Image: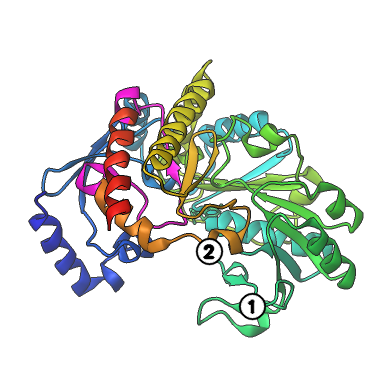
Amino acid sequence: MKTNASKKLFEAALRVMPGGVNSPVRAFKAVWTLPHFIARARGAKLYDADGNAFVDYVMSWGPLVLGHAPAPVVKAVARAAARGTSYGAPTALEVQLAEMIVEAVPSMERVRLVNSGTEAVMSAIRLARAYTGRDAILKFEGCYHGHADSLLVKAGSGAMTLGIPDSPGVPADLARHTFTAPYNDITAVERLLEAHRGNFACVIVEPVALRDLTHHYRIVLVFDEVLTGFRVAYGGAQARYGVTPDLTCLGKIIGGGLPVGAYGGRADIMKLIAPDGPVYQAGTLSGNPLAVTAGIETLKLLKKAGVYRQLEERGRQLGDGLSRAAREAGLQVTLNRVGSMMTLFFTPGPVTDYASAKKSDTQAYAKYFRAMLSQGIYLAPSQFEAVFLSTAHTPADLNKTVKAARAAFNKLKIT
Ligand SMILES: Cc1ncc(COP(=O)(O)O)c(C=O)c1O
């Protein structure tokens, strides 16, 4: 496989950008190889600067549920661009996207559009703090909710210790308001909420069963559906699992591949947002017509009958194929899948939380990643990320992927 063009671009990038990238995982450090610079993409395929083609399972880390450059979305965005890319003033398009979100996710009675998932979560937490008049927040170990200071915190050695900053630059004074608990451990959550009764503003989670507890302690339940919104069902994980949060954060898919985020929820909480209320939050490019148009067109296509059934079937085909191939190669792996997202962990499992996920053999993953890449399959360059399918992935793409995985697994068994 030719890589000269990517190598040259990476050298140039390293001279002007930290690590040569604008988001750390793109540098491929965890998989011990150099990143491929992408020149273009269409459907399920990525093409790099050297002309290599890959079946893409990163899909821009989730937003591209319809594949790369779906014609109706591209056409609508081009038309919108010709009318001006941002006005810093309200538009009919924003109302249309907000109406589509509110209809799809009934717990979101009001919605505010922002420019990224990070911004959505950060703003929802500020709002929960203002609503409750409390500072502490509870998150779960190993859960990523974007890079806002309050959220770059996980537990120290003990599960229920005070927050320790995960990144230099996060003030300890701020981190101490972030508590963490093990994922899937409702007893730990209850113990924490009881021990610090009256201090917690919100619990933030990628959805599971916390509704009763947060209601009991009068805490705002925030679902981070940046990844799962419009992916695991049109109405997100809350529709799939039937749990209603107070606030929801969205991103990724609602921007159809353009920068976007949104947070929203109960009208009585959302009315605190400026200019209705005192909680300040603003954005120069928030709700810009390009991102909003891409979002509207994407949601329209997702609403068509059979889309989620197709995503589920393709997810099952790939998940079953990978599990079978690993088993036949005698490897002990765990495949966790919800609909069209899945992660293959190199551990016998089960993987249910941060501690069990950390048991995965990341060196084996790196070898698997490189063996797949050399066969034209582009996976996430990190064990702790997911495979994302789109409606553009064909059964032939999936068969090719499983065949490549079989070869990769057999190679892994030998080395
Ligand atoms: C669950 C979740 N929340 C928040 C974020 C942050 O979103 P963004 O990268 O758009 O800031 C991500 C990004 O991967 C995410 O997966």
> In the image shown, does 132 or 392 lie closer to the viewer?
392
Mark carried by residue 156: 1
- Percent position (x, y) of residue 344? 46, 47
At label 2, counting other C-alpha atoms closer than 10 Å, the crowd grade (few under 14, some 14-19, many 20 or more) is some
Can residue 196 be seen in this snapshot?
A: yes
Q: Is residue 73 within the magenta segment?
A: no
Looking at the rendered structure, the secondary structure element under dot 2 is: loop
Based on the displayed image, in which of its 4 quarters is residue 229 positioned? top right
| Number of numbered tags placed on the structure image | 2
161 lies above or below 284: below
Q: What residue sits right under mark 2 in the picture?
A: 358
What residue range appears in magenta? 373-397
Can residue 23 be seen in this snapshot?
A: no
At label 1, counting other C-alpha atoms closer than 10 Å, the crowd grade (few under 14, some 14-19, many 20 or more) is some
Q: Quadrant of the C terminus?
A: bottom left
> In the image shown, does 14 or 192 lie closer to the viewer?
192
Looking at the rendered structure, the secondary structure element under dot 1 is: loop
- Give the distance between the C-alpha atoms of the residues marked 1 and 2, in whole angstroms: 15 Å
- Percent position (x, y) of residue 280? 66, 62
Say which amino acid is labelled 1: Gly
